Amino acid sequence: MLRLSAKDQALLAGDSGPGVRKAMEIVVALGRIYGAERLVPVSSVQVAGVSYRNLGEAGLEFLREWADQGARARVPTTLNPAGIDLRAWRELGFSESFARRQLAVIEAYRRLGVRTTCTCTPYLVGNVPRVGEHVAWAESSAVSYANSVLGARTNREGGPSALAAAIAGRTAAYGLHLDQNRRATLRVAVRCPVRTLSDFGALGHLVGRAARNCVPYLVFEGREDACSGVALKALGAAMAASGAVALYHVAGCTPEADRPDILASDHETLVVDDLQPAYAALNSGALENENRIDLVWFGCPHAGLEEMAEVVRLLDGRRVRTALWITAAREMRERAAAEGLVAAVEASGGRVIADMCAVVAPMQELGFRTLATPSAKGATYLPSYAGLRVRYGTVEQCVEAAVTGVWSA
Ligand code: F3S
């Protein structure tokens, strides 16, 4: 049975206003549905549900009403990507009608006290919870990173439940907030080489499909360095997209992997000895026009400096024939500009785009038909969400596609 503290009860009774009462009603209802015994304070929140394409007018009105009721985030709260670059949308070709509604959504979040970071990698721009800290994050790749790589504790929140936790400052303690639910029930023996970023995405794709929403424990039997943050970001995002994996452990690497009881005694086993089935699944069928590519997209999840520098290194000053986008947090774009990376990408004819995610953008407004990416998450969602035909491969292959305009297997 859910027990509420005196403070919880006061907030639920409306002592801090109707906006907070509504947030508490959501948090408490979820706690009762999932059998939580108590609420826990959260140290940060990541809110998803930002693109006007997904929210529509009803979602925008919902946010405005909540802000009118005096609701404000009471813990540091960051925001997922939007459907446009909030400043460069016109140059990118997005319509004024969409941009106007998207900017209204951002304004509503600002009134709710949310830091309008517009990124799915809040952990790269200052929202970095510590091991064991309770947080309430939405956005599947960020949830996976927070739980698995940072060792924080969050369920896979939806947009309204994360916002409710931000306004209430607490969440219900069930699911991945509890020790017993963080144990792995699937041991994954990785027996093939996993070298490139797209290999990590391909592996994540296969594991996510098998694991669905259980907790995998990966053992790399080769000598790959699976401990780089960039590799784990790609791995976790892919698992969260093909399955609903919100937490994974990597032997000898992630913070909870060495806990003695981390692998449940009745766990199942999966052996991965070939990544090709994932590459096949993540590539759409035949492309028209002799494998011609319109757009090459890096930065899903949003890129850090290391990933941008790699693209610049591979471009090596060459001009691109396709559109080339690297999406990143605005703060990260500013850091990249200071290091000369934005200028280098632009000198090749590409763009470093802030605030935005191609999966939730109104891509049909731009007329692209084919896209290449090294992101397994992007390749999973783009065909259905954006109607694009996709080529999935290494960062190197994607850069070559941008330079030649053609996908070469
Ligand atoms: Fe981020 Fe969008 Fe990819 S939210 S993880 S860039 S699908």
Image (cartoon, rainbow, N blue to C red):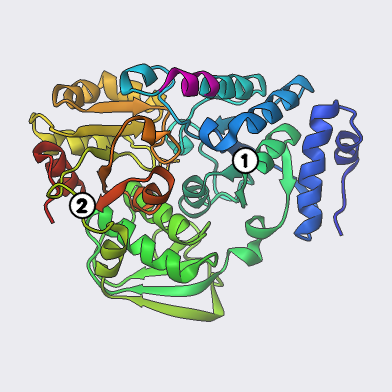
Q: Is residue 40 magenta?
A: no
The quadrant of the rendering that contains the C terminus is: bottom left
Secondary structure at badge 1 equals: helix
Closer to us: 82 or 234: 82
Q: Image quarter for residue 307?
A: top left
The quadrant of the rendering that contains the N terminus is: bottom right
Give, as a three-letter code, the residue at label 1. Answer: Gly
| Magenta-tinted stretch | 95-101
342 left or right of 65 in image: left
**As drawn, which residue projects farthest toward the bottom?**
266
Q: Measuring 39% from the left and 43% from the top, which residue is drawn there?
A: 386
284 in relation to 323, above or below: below
- Does mark 1 have its CB less than 8 Å from ligand 1? no
Q: Position of residue 196 (x, y in %)?
A: 22, 55
Q: Main secondary structure of the magenta part?
A: helix
Please say whether residue 214 is visible from this viewpoint.
yes
- Residue that label 2 marks: 287
25 in relation to 149, above or below: above
Please say whether residue 225 is visible from this viewpoint.
no
Q: Position of residue 263 (x, y in %)?
A: 52, 73
Q: Image quarter for residue 218?
A: bottom left
Q: Position of residue 292 (x, y in %)?
A: 15, 44
- Residue that label 1 marks: 159
73 left or right of 357 in image: right
